[in-house]
Image (cartoon, rainbow, N blue to C red):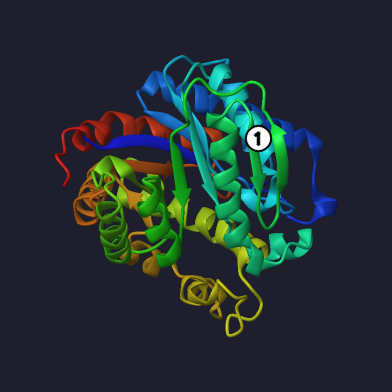
Amino acid sequence: MVKSWLFDIFNYPYDSAPEGLDPALVEDEFDWHLDAWVKAEELGYDGVLFSEHHFTAYNMSPSPNLLVAAVAQRTNTLRLGAMCNVTAFHNPRRLAEETAMLDYLTRGRLEVGLGRGADDHEFRKEGFPLEDTRPWFEESLELMHKAWEQPRFTHHGRFFHYDDVSIYPRPRRTPRIWVTALSPATIAWAGSKGYRLSLAFMPAKVMAQFRNIYNEAAADAGHSTAPEQIGVMRNIFVADSDEEARDLAEPALDHVFRLFKEAAVPDDLGHMAPGYEGYSSFFAPFAAEGGVRFEDLQASGAVVVGSPSTVRDQLVAQVEEIGCGHLMNWFSFGQLTRDQTMRSMELYAKEIVPALRSLEVR
């Protein structure tokens, strides 16, 4: 069975300059997105996942855990989480406390997603050295486990030092952790720890290769390699016909990927920070003159746009190639309206979810 989730990086779809922000429009975006996330439960989705980005119109969710808390009070069955909390923007003991609190506010429905982050401009604006993101990330998770699992703990590492401290409350049990990763090193590390893995943007063929890396590391450490361990995020848009879907989705994708380029793509791909050298190939299509093309995104499988049958067939093929047990569907992007997004969600739930649930993935 393949589970279907909503994933939302909801951007400001109007003037992206800071001076162009209109509070009334921001409020409207929050209101209708909240309606969509609550509607997901009625439509039968398995959960809703939010994102963390900072300082640009690319995303209006600098604190996704606030959204988790808000949606938790309006729903009963949805799993809820952030995919992911970027550890470089957090003190890990503070984040351990916050996730423990959310464990109670969600009544056990929390998914904890963590990652070291990849958006060059965000780190530079914060003044955080990119070469420190991996050691900070790994030490953060080590400390968070101590905080969740021990009534009192001591920790002395490179970045954090605590003696005989506690968090309050602690979660009822150690949270289930997802790691969002783009690099083979992080993917192998996640497998060795038994964490679930979240993949995004890359072609299905590359994701299948990455799943093999994950499986090998997980098996060597005695952890599960089941499809349930793997989630894949895709930009999805469903309409009544292929033509209608493309007419609406293509300009919306152009808008959001332009914002992504401004927010994330490094200025000099030939000289990436230590630990990020392998990311140059990932960012290259977005940095190319003219930007990334819709046809290339479709061919790679990074976006899936079309009628219900088109989207269903493409997603089934990708799931079987990658061997993943979760699809994280980014429905709302660019200037797509409330009605267009809701219609897409409804068509997916009615026409595509049953086919995915019936799949036996290996």
Residue 179 image position (x, y, % from top left)? 46, 48
Q: Secondary structure at mark 1?
A: helix
For residue 11, say whether it is visible.
Answer: yes
Q: Which residue is at the far bottom?
A: 270
Along the line of sight, the residue nearer the viewer: 26 or 328: 328
Mark 1 = which residue? 29
- The answer to whether residue 215 is above or below residue 95 is below
Q: Which residue is depicted at the point 53% across and 53% down?
A: 252
For residue 340, say whether it is visible.
Answer: no
Q: Which residue is depicted at the point 14% across and 39% down?
A: 360
Along the line of sight, the residue nearer the viewer: 79 or 26: 79
Along the line of sight, the residue nearer the viewer: 305 or 128: 128
Residue 113 image position (x, y, % from top left)? 50, 42
- The answer to whether residue 352 is above or below residue 285 is above
Q: In the drawing, does residue 286 fall left or right of residue 56?
A: left
Q: Which residue is depicted at the point 40% across and 64% down?
A: 297
- The answer to whether residue 107 is above or below residue 320 is above
Along the line of sight, the residue nearer the viewer: 67 or 145: 145
Tell me which amino acid carries mark 1.
Glu
Residue 211 image position (x, y, % from top left)? 29, 57
Residue 282 image position (x, y, % from top left)? 47, 70
